[in-house]
Image: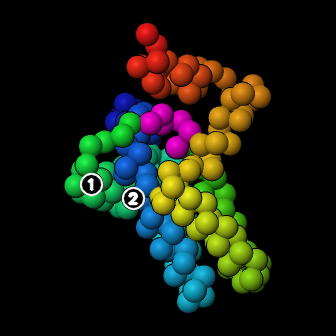
Amino acid sequence: MGSKLRSVFAFPNPVNEVAARVVAGVVVLLCAATVGFREPWLLVPLCYGFWARALTGPTLSPLGRLATRVVAPRLGPARPVAGPPKRFAQAIGVLFSSAAVVLWFGAGQATAAMGVTAALGAAAFLESALGLCLGCRAFAALMRLGFVPDEVCAACADVALRHPELAA
């Protein structure tokens, strides 16, 4: 039972960047719908998705499973990237989406909740459309500053592991 539970909570490493960008695109749409239509109930699946993906990768996320198993394979070859920065980015999504839920439902601060949701949507847009993962950039900065040990992400710490063609 212990190993099965561990496998449920295992985050993939590497991650298919194509699938990550698909997920980010749906997050953009969900954030836009939440803000555009001022529908706070949409914050619930948004928040659940980030929690599920941060804890288990695509395992408990219907969107993650759809992106990794159905959509991304049809968009071309996988583009593997390091998993730990993507997990960190999902954790930031947990913070933003959870804050939006608490602001709307707990504190009655609809405008603040929509602002947080819009910021989350903007970050997801950068990931989806441009491949610019702000959470991954923050993770890299934390590694450079020594807050994240090199062992957490060997591929992040060693450019030769990320780009074997440069190792020669």
Q: What predominant SS class does the magenta segment belong to? A: helix
Q: Determine which residue is flagged by label 2.
A: 22
Where residue 28 sits in the image (x, y, percent)? Answer: 51, 69
Residue 59 appears in view: yes
Where residue 25 sits in the image (x, y, percent)? Answer: 45, 64
Q: Quadrant of residue 116?
A: bottom right
Residue 9 belongs to the span the image colors magenta: no
- Using the image, tell me which numbered label, if any, was put on residue 88: none
Q: Is residue 131 above or below residue 168?
A: below
> What residue appears at the point 74 percent right and 83 percent down from the top-left corner?
111
Label 1 crowding class (10 Å Cα cut-off): few <14, some 14-19, many 20+?
few
- Please indicate whether residue 49 sits to the left or right of residue 34 in the image: left
Q: Is residue 123 above or below residue 43?
A: above
> What residue appears at the point 51 percent right and 55 percent down from the top-left corner?
130
Determine the secondary structure under disc 1: loop
Q: Nearer the viewer, residue 45 or 163?
A: 163
Which portion, as a residue range, is magenta?
A: 81-86
Residue 82 belongs to the span the image colors magenta: yes
Locate the N terminus and report the quarter of the image it occupies.
top left
Q: Nearer the viewer, residue 68 or 110?
A: 68
Q: Quadrant of residue 147?
A: top right
- Name the kind of residue labelled 1 in the image: Leu
Q: Determine which residue is flagged by label 1.
A: 75
- Name the kind of residue labelled 2 in the image: Val
Q: Quadrant of residue 11?
A: top left
> What residue appears at the point 61 percent right and 60 percent down from the top-left corner?
123
